[in-house]
Image (cartoon, rainbow, N blue to C red):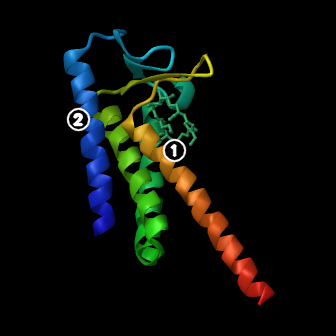
Amino acid sequence: MFYYIIALLIILLDQLTKWMVVHYMKLGESIQVIENLLYITSHRNRGAAWGILQGQMWFFYIITVIVMIGLVYYLEKEAKYNKLFGISIALMLGGAMGNFIDRVFRKEVVDFVNTYIFTYDFPIFNVADSALVIGVGLIMLHMLREEREAKKNQDG
Ligand SMILES: CCC[C@@H]1OC(=O)[C@@H](C)C[C@H](C)CCCCC(=O)CCC[C@@H](CC)/C=C/C=C(\COC)CC[C@@H](O)[C@@H](O)C[C@H](O)CNC1=O
């Protein structure tokens, strides 16, 4: 149950930030936060990461529903016994849901975090994307840790 609250908090934070960008900024408007590093730019994306698959909403609905069913399944089956794994699933669940809500109600995803990493203009993303990427990263950490433990047990 605790993990669903994390997912819910991610969804609320994601939707709140997107709502503020939509209501207080014009499309394309940019606010500098840290010069040459971080800007808040009001942006919309009808695709997935890097704008791939523009407008393929049905594809996104199907993929997102499959991803969320898989995440809930793992959360119920495995993650109850492992905090790190549970939190990463919850982050991904919240992130997937955040963008899913945009795709259903807005038919596009609101993005606003505009970072220039080493002058490369990284695609503009949002809280939901960050939760997804952090969740993916934590899952990899969890798998590495499990592998190391398994090896240690094997070596005796
Ligand atoms: C983060 C997943 C993208 C997110 O997937 C989702 O919603 C999921 C739940 C549903 C998708 C239809 C299915 C996964 C597609 C996988 C994918 O796309 C490859 C992901 C690579 C990833 C490594 C894990 C890199 C990171 C990229 C970015 C995020 O950097 C922080 C750039 C984000 C900007 O292009 C922004 O415009 C995107 C826009 O907000 C819509 N977001 C999505 O489609």
Label number found at residue 16: 2
Q: Residue at x 63, y 21 (%)?
A: 118
Vertical comparison of 91 with 124: above or below: below
* Residue lying furthest left: 23
Crowding at mark 2 (Cα within 10 Å: few <14, some 14-19, many 20+): few
The residue labelled by disc 1 is 133
Q: Label 1 neighbourhood size at 10 Å, few (<14), some (14-19), many (20+)?
A: some
Q: Is mark 1 within 8 Å of ligand 1?
A: yes
The residue positioned 27% from the left and 53% from the top of the image is 8
Residue at x 51% of width, y 14% of height? 36
- Residue 52 visible, this orientation: no
Residue 19, given in percent of the width and then of the height, sits at 22, 28
Q: Amino acid at mark 1?
A: Val
Q: Nearer the viewer, residue 2 or 93?
A: 2
Q: 112 above or below 149?
A: above
Kind of residue sitting beneath label 2: Leu
Looking at this view, name the residue that lies furthest to the right: 155
Residue at image position (63%, 65%) is 143
